[in-house]
Image (spheres, rainbow, N blue to C red):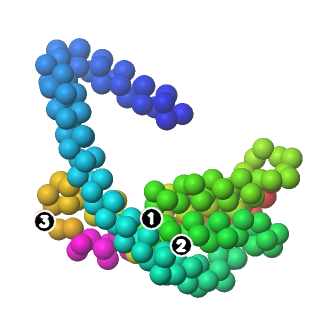
Amino acid sequence: MLGKSFSFLCIISLLATFLTKNEKALADSIFGGAAKSVTVVISILGLMTLWNGILEVLKDAGVIEKLSKLLRPILKHIFPRAFKENTATEEITACVSANILGLSNATTPLALLAIGKMNEGRKSDKATNDMITLAILGCACFNIIPTTVIAMRVSQGASITYELLVPVWICSFVCMTVGIILCRLIGKICGDT
């Protein structure tokens, strides 16, 4: 689906370029954008490495494990089937904990492992409500330290970087809450497969 969407956008862009006879601007933006993207990636890489190092120290210090223990009582209400069947609860808890601490790039393998464990022994190829909820939390989870956003802003020379923490906390909490509520409501309407 993403490939089709990207192809559609490229075709529309090319058509608009040829209709407006603005080929030079297209070529300039393609090459300029490619060069700028390399610069952005290199600057973000350094910041992400720093934050991942800090978060790895927190992990070694047991902060993620303590956060996981704090989250378990809440997560058993968000993932009722998984906690009732005692399936992938450690992976779910670690995934959500890492996401909250801003280690979003490390949560994908944990989420895939958790979904794989939740899918073991099932005959249906449809996702359960718990699987969908985990995917939603992967996209819209509350972040204490939004490392990617901070890294992007610093790499672009933004004057306001850390002042955005409170708005990010509010937005991410609202998105997470709405996502969980919608998942539960739709799950009640459609049933859990």
Can you identify the residue that label 3 sits on? 159
Q: Is residue 61 left or right of residue 40?
A: right
Q: Earlier in the sequence, mark 1 or mark 3?
A: 1
Above or below residue 10? Residue 105 is below
* Discs 1/3, front: 1
On residue 192, which mark appears?
Answer: none
The magenta segment is 162-171
* In-front residue for pair 191/123: 123
Q: Is residue 85 left or right of residue 40?
A: right
Can you identify the residue that label 2 sits on? 97
Task: Please identify the quadrant where the N terminus is shown.
Answer: top right
For numbered disc 3, what is the local secondary structure? loop
On residue 103, which mark appears?
Answer: 1
Identity of the residue drawn at 75% across and 73% down:
83
**Few, some or many residues within 10 Å of mark 1 (<14, 14–19, 20+):** many
Q: Kindly tell me whether residue 48 is visible in this rendering.
A: yes
- The number of numbered discs placed on residues in the rendered structure image is 3
* Discs 2/3, front: 2
Label 1 amino acid? Leu
* In-front residue for pair 30/169: 30
Residue 70 point in image, percent of width and height: 58, 85
Q: CA distance from mark 2 to mark 3?
A: 30 Å
**Few, some or many residues within 10 Å of mark 2 (<14, 14–19, 20+):** many
Q: Kindly tell me whether residue 143 is visible in this rendering.
A: no
